[in-house]
Amino acid sequence: MNDNEKKRKRLFDIYSDNLKLLNYSGLIKIDLKFGKTFICPLCLNQFSEEALDTNLSNFLTLEDVPPVAIGGSPLVLTCKSCNNTIGSQIDYHLITQMQDLEFLKGQPSSPRDARVLINEDLGVKGTLKFEGNGIYSVLISNDNNNPKIVADHISKIKKDEIVTTFFTKRKPILKEQIALAILKTGYLLMYHKLGYTYLFDKSFNYYRHILQNPKGNVNKIFFHQFKTHPISKPYDTYIMSDRREKSFFIVFRVHTKTGFSRSFGIWLPIPGFSIERSILSWQSQHITKKEIIFHSTPVSSINTVHETFNLNKFIYNS
Ligand SMILES: [Zn+2]
């Protein structure tokens, strides 16, 4: 068994045991199809241990949470169908946004394809590269341009002139899809820590539905972006259930290869409480005060008890 197989088997065992235990204790009521059953957290389809076989068309895959391109690691199992379709459709937007921000903030990073515009001209294709010390260079070659147009462009560039450049050759980044990527990460982190305890509650149906149908309405995704990680122990994931807000608050950090990072906090509902009411409560308290003390209920992890955490103090950077 290689490392990938071992890890998938271990996750299958942990989560199928969790499912069995919750069902046995009566906390959930699911008609389990197999002796050892795994349920994909995104589509809720049931799988037997045989689904670990990679020869099957829809086998169980390791899912990187957040996506590996922005610092994630394989934390949970999802079915191949969900991992491929939901991943490629949604994650692209958050990853590309992070890479653009990284580039524009002047982090040394890989050259990016760009379109160079001078005045209102049509422009030529080029490669934009950050050189360090706030200097960007644009490389324009005759290989993928009409040499006459290139010569014409270059003759028009004056010293110290601002040249407009655009990143090219890619799909547009959509705000709604970034929100979905943040939702997907928060939802899977909650599942990673808590297993199936809350997963089947109907309050989560809406979130699964919009992840499966990413063109839908994303108005009920509430998240906050932090420039600096809001919790003293960075690079970690926290789940917070507060007595007043009555919601899960999942904080995570994403970072590019060069270390450019952003942190996000996303609210997910606690069964039986309206997420809108939780958000209103949070905003009324947190927008007025800069520093808030949370009286949080620690949430223990499904995997290891020592991952239980306390979130006592929270600094809000407006
Ligand atoms: Zn699935």
Image (tube, rainbow, N blue to C red):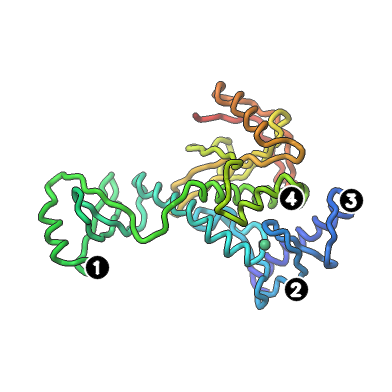
> Which residue type does callout 1 highlight?
Asn
> Which residue is under mark 3?
25
> Which residue is under mark 2?
50
**Pointer 4 or 2: first along the chain:** 2
Q: Which residue is at the far bottom?
A: 55
Quarter assignment of residue 58: bottom right
> Which residue is under mark 1?
144
Label 4 sits on a secondary structure element that is: loop
**Pointer 4 or 3: first along the chain:** 3
Q: CA distance from mark 4 to mark 3?
A: 16 Å
Q: CA distance from mark 2 to mark 3?
A: 26 Å
Q: Residue at x 21, y 66 (%)?
A: 145
The crowding category of the residue bearing disc 3, from other C-alpha atoms within 10 Å (few below 14, some 14 to 19, many at least 20), is: few
Label 3 sits on a secondary structure element that is: helix
**Pointer 3 or 1: first along the chain:** 3
**Pointer 2 or 1: first along the chain:** 2
The crowding category of the residue bearing disc 4, from other C-alpha atoms within 10 Å (few below 14, some 14 to 19, many at least 20), is: many
**The one of 24 and 124 positioned closer to us in this rendering:** 124
Q: Nearer the viewer, mark 3 or mark 1?
A: 1
> Which residue type does callout 3 highlight?
Ser
Question: Left or right of 245: which side holds 117?
Answer: left
Label 1 sits on a secondary structure element that is: loop
